[in-house]
Image: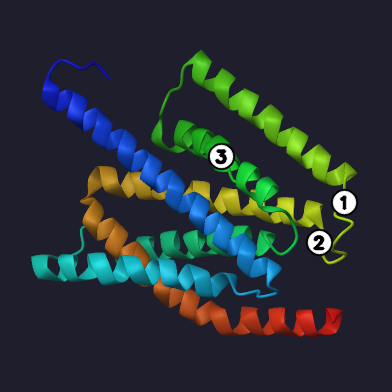
Amino acid sequence: MEIRTKDDAWRLLLVLFLGQLVAFSMAACSFASSFIANLGVDAPLAQSFCTHLLLTLVYVPILLRRRQKLRIPWYWYLVLAFVDVQGNYLVTEAYQYSSITSVTLLDCWTVVWAIILTWYALGTRYSFWQFLGAGTCVAGLALVLLSDANTPDAQDPNKIPLLGDALVIAGTVCYAFSNVGEEHCVKKNDRVEVVAMLGLFGVLVSTIQVYPLHSSSAEKTAVIR
C-alpha cells in the first residue's frame, strides 16, 4: 500500500489496529473455548449460537431499516450459515481432545483451503512468493501433527490429540467454503445483507442442532465417567 497523504497514513493505521483487534478477539475466543473445555463443559453449539446471535442483533435491524428485498436468494445464505456453524462446531469441539496450541495453529489450514477454492472457484491468481509462504506454513502445521502423534497427553487420558487435530482440519475445510462463499456474495452485494443473513440463519441452524448434539455429548461424558 503506497502512502501519499496523511489520510492514507491514518487509514493504514486504522486497518492495522482493526486487524490487531480481530486477532486479539480470536485469541480471547480460543482461550475461552479451551478454558470451558478444561472445566469439563462440552457445548460448542451454544458458543456458536451466541456468536451468530450477536451478528443478528446488530445487523438484522440495519437490514430491516433499509426495507429492501434480498439481492441473493435466501437459501444460499442458509447453506453458508450451515457450513459456518459446522466449522465452528468442529473446531470448538476439538478443544475437548487437543491443546489450545495445536488447535490455534492448525486453524491456519483455513488459508490453504481458501487459496485452493479461490483459485478454482473465483479465478484468483497468486504469485510464487504467496505459494511459498503458504507452503512454509503447511510444513509447520505438519510438524504439529507429528508432535501430537508422538507425544500423547499423559496428564489427561480423555485427551486424544490426533482426533482433536482431525476435527480442526475438518472444521477449516468448512471455514474455507464459508469464507469463499461470503467473499463471492460480498463482491455481488452489500456486506450488511450478507452478515445479517449469515447471523440469522446461523442462529436457526444452531438452535436446530443444539439439542440432539449436546444430548449425545452429555451421554458420552456420562459413559466415560
| Number of numbered discs on residues | 3
Tell me the residue that label 2 is attached to. Answer: 159
The alpha-carbon separation of the residues under discs 3 and 2 comes to 27 Å
Give the quadrant of the N terminus.
top left
Taking the spot 10% from the left edge, 69% from the top edge, the residue there is 65
Comes first in the chain, label 3 or label 2: 3
Amino acid type of the residue tagged 1 in the rendering? Pro
Taking the spot 58% from the left edge, 18% from the top edge, the residue there is 132
Taking the spot 59% from the left edge, 46% from the top edge, the residue there is 107
Q: Quadrant of residue 36?
A: bottom right
Instruction: Please state the horizontal and vertical placement of residue 57, each as a whole percent of the image.
Output: 28, 72
Amino acid type of the residue tagged 2 in the rendering? Lys
Tell me the residue that label 1 is attached to. Answer: 152
Instruction: Please state the horizontal and vertical placement of residue 104, each as a whole percent of the image.
Output: 61, 47
* Foreground: disc 3 or disc 1: 1
Relative to 74, 208 lies left or right: right
